[in-house]
Every structure is written in C-alpha cells, then in structure tokens.
Amino acid sequence: MLEGSIWNKLLMFALPLAATGMLQQLFNAADVAVVGQFAGPNAMAAVGSNSPVIGLLVNGFVGLALGANVVISTYTGQKNREGVRRCVHTSVLFALLGGLAVTVIGELIAPSVLTLMSVPDEVFPMALAYLRWYLLGMPVIILYNFESAIFRSQGDTKTPLVCLVISGLINVMFNLFFVCILKMTADGVAIATVLSNLISSVLLFVFLCRRSDAVRVEFSHIAIHRDAVRNIVRIGLPAGLQSMVFSLSNMCIQSAINSLGTSVMAASSAAFNIEILAYYLINSFGQACTTFVGQNYGAGNIPRCRRITRISLFMDMGVTAAVSMLLLALGGPLLRIFNSDPEIVSIGIVRLRFILAAEVVNAVMEIMSGAMRGYGYSLVPAITTFAGVCGIRIVWVYTIFRAAPGFFNLMMVYPVSWCATAAALVCAYLLFMKKMVRQESPA
C-alpha cells in the first residue's frame, strides 16, 4: 500500500471485499427467497421488515470495526507492532462485549421497535420471532466484522471471503432444512443465519491465532486497553453513527412502506436484496480508500493519499455505473427469483429504477467519507451525512409522503437525499484538503 502503482492494488483489495459483501447479501437474499417460495409473502415481508432494524444494530459496530481498521492500518504504516497488538486484542474482546450488550438490550425492546415501525398484525409474530433469533447471534456477527477489519488492515480481503463462502453455503443448507423439512418460517432462516455467522467468526478467529505477524491473536493477551479503545472510538464512533444514520432513515422509510401493504413490503424487500449488491461494490472502494489513506497517512505520505482518493473516486464511479446498469437490465428476472407475483415484480422494478439510477452519486459519498476517515477525521462526514441523509428523509416522509402517500413519492427521497449529501461532502473534503495543504506549507 505504501509504494508503487495504486489502481491495481486498490482493485485487488476492493474486489474481494466487494465479493464478500455481495456474497453475504446473496446468502441473506437466500433467506428471503426461501421463505418467499416456501413460506409465502407474509413470511417474506416479515424478514424484509427487519432489514432496517438489523442494519441499525450491525452498522454501528461495523463503523467501530472500521475505526479499528484505520487505527491498525496507521500503526502498521508507522511500523508500531505494539500498537497493532494492543488494538487487535482489544478489538476481539470489545466486539464480544458489545455484541452481548446489543443482544440483551435488543431482546428487551424488540416488540416496541417493530410496533413503532407499523409492522402489520398478520406479519408481526413472524417478524418478532425472526428479530429475537437474530439478536441472539449478535456477539458472533459483530466479532466477524471486527475480525474482518483486522485482516483488511493488513491488505488481506481474501481470508474473510473464503470464510464467508464456507459459512454462506452452510447457511443456504440450513435455510432449506429449517423451512422445507422442519416447516419453520422466518424464525428458521434467522436460526440458519446465526449458526452460519458462528462458523465464519470461529474460522477467522482460528486464522488470527495462527498468524505469525503483529495481528496474531493470543488468548493470554486478550484484554481491553484504554488507549486502543479511545482511538477506535474516536474514529469508529462517528463512522458508526454515519452508518446508523442510514439505518435510522431507512427505518423511517420502512415504516412508510409498511403502511402501503404486504405486497409493497414484499416487493421492497426483494428489490433491496438486488440493489444492495451495487452498494457493497461502492462501499468496498470506500473502505479500500480508507485503508490505503490510513497506512500512507501513518507513513507521512500526504501526496500519495491525495492520489489514492482521486483514483478511488474514478474507479468507484465507473464500476458502479456499469454494475447498476446490469442489475437494472436484469431487474425483472431477478425479482421473480424471490416471488413471481406480477404485482410484486412491478412494484420492485419501480424501486430498482430509483435506487440504481442514482448509485453513482452514492459512490461520491463513500469515497469522500472514506478518505476523511483514513486521515482520522470521522466526525465531519458523520455530521454531514446525518443532516443530508437522515434529515431530508425524515422531513420528506412526514411532509411530501404524508401529503400524497404513494410508493413513487416515497422512492424519490433516495436520489434527492444522496445528491444533497454528496454535494456537501465534496465541499467538506475540499475544505479539509485546503487545511491540510496549509499545515504542510512552511511558515
């Protein structure tokens, strides 16, 4: 990461990371597809209605894991082995304790959360069962994300991918077993998800224990180090809040979707599992930018950091545009995998058109935020995203959508909020870089 050409190394880093996210989503999509084909649209809607809630819970810790990635990357660039060691062992214990806290709190408030989201009565019992089972697996789900961040900090995105492929295939088999053989519904696919995440987190932990470099995990060294927690939280908490902002606004939108009926809920759930594939590609370049900038900033090479940001932006926008057009062209056949009902397919295509047509703008947001996080500045993109994404979407739902309830009016909020936030983040990044240039200039 610290020398030589940039674009090919970014690509080698980002593509396995994107494949990891896409496969993870494909295995999650298998949950929706299995219940949609074998348990009916209500079970499909129950799984889909939980997506924003689960995203809210997981994304906060994914942001904190990104903080660990940045801190370990920076220490690696500085060749600070002791700093790397302390941060790695802190991350493992921090993930498990955080996951346990989410499980306990989540189980207590699960019914209230689904009630606030206006989940219909015919879907509510299955949605609650799915959420309760998923919450039980939060410690291993969060641990997997922190372990993956440790590997990414060293430029290794392939090991998490291999572990995910293994656990994902097991997840699909468990889905079919619980739903088709045991005749379970949404709760069956939730149990399958928890078991598969347990397998992937254990596999990564074993690989970390077998490494010979600074990120090797040893049981006797697992502890919470205050300096490591402080650095992880300083960078990761704003990033986590930024991710949670998306989930909070999506919960608000999901509540509006739920008010439009079961068919809209099922169609939106199916479309989400397709469009999110493009997002994982976008996000992979954003995380690559963060990691590369973090290591080079730790090594004091600011000009290379700027080149990394430019190359990441152009690559992300180009690849995202191509993949989004492909998914849009295949939208109908892909939606029929989840449910062949013509009404559900037609509603799903409406959502895909709004989301995929604007994904290039989302790429700008990810790279600008990722670059600033790589420098260790996470607060500005977090605040900007909160105002631009969460603010606009909540206002939209309670004004424009309430005045004219309809799926078309609701979907308009995505491109509008992305464009406004992307413009603000570009301005924030340019101002930040001007400040960096002034600091570099001799007095």
Image (cartoon, grey):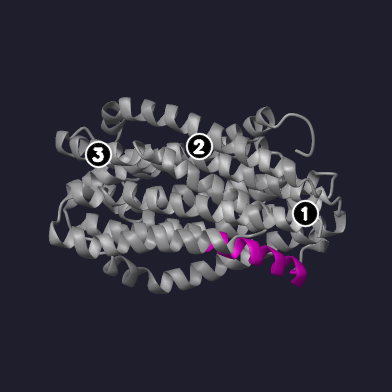
User: Within 10 angstroms of label 3, few (less than 14), some, or many (20 or more) residues?
Assistant: many
Which numbered disc covers residue 402? Answer: none
- Whole-Å distance between the Cαs marked 1 and 3? 53 Å
Identify which amino acid the numbered label 1 is placed on. Answer: Ser
Q: Where is mark 1, residue-wise?
A: 441
In front: 422, or 156? 422
Q: Return the disc, 1 or 3, that comes first in the chain's sequence.
A: 3
**Horizontal side, residue 259 vs residue 163: left or right:** left
Q: Return the disc, 1 or 2, that comes first in the chain's sequence.
A: 2
Q: Are marks 3 and 2 in contact (CB under 8 Å)?
A: no
Q: How many tags in the picture? A: 3
Q: Where is mark 2, residue-wise?
A: 281
User: Within 10 angstroms of label 2, few (less than 14), some, or many (20 or more) residues?
Assistant: many
**Horizontal side, residue 210 vs residue 30: left or right:** right
Residue at coordinates 64% horizontally, 62% vertically from top-left? Answer: 235
User: Within 10 angstroms of label 1, few (less than 14), some, or many (20 or more) residues?
Assistant: few
Residue at coordinates 69% horizontally, 59% vertically from top-left? Answer: 92
**Residue 273 locus on image (x, y percent):** 37, 41
**Residue 193 locus on image (x, y percent):** 47, 48
**Residue 16 locus on image (x, y percent):** 60, 33
In front: 134, or 401? 401
Q: Does the magenta stretch include residue 96?
A: no
Q: Where is mark 3, residue-wise?
A: 348
- Whole-Å distance between the Cαs marked 3 and 2? 21 Å
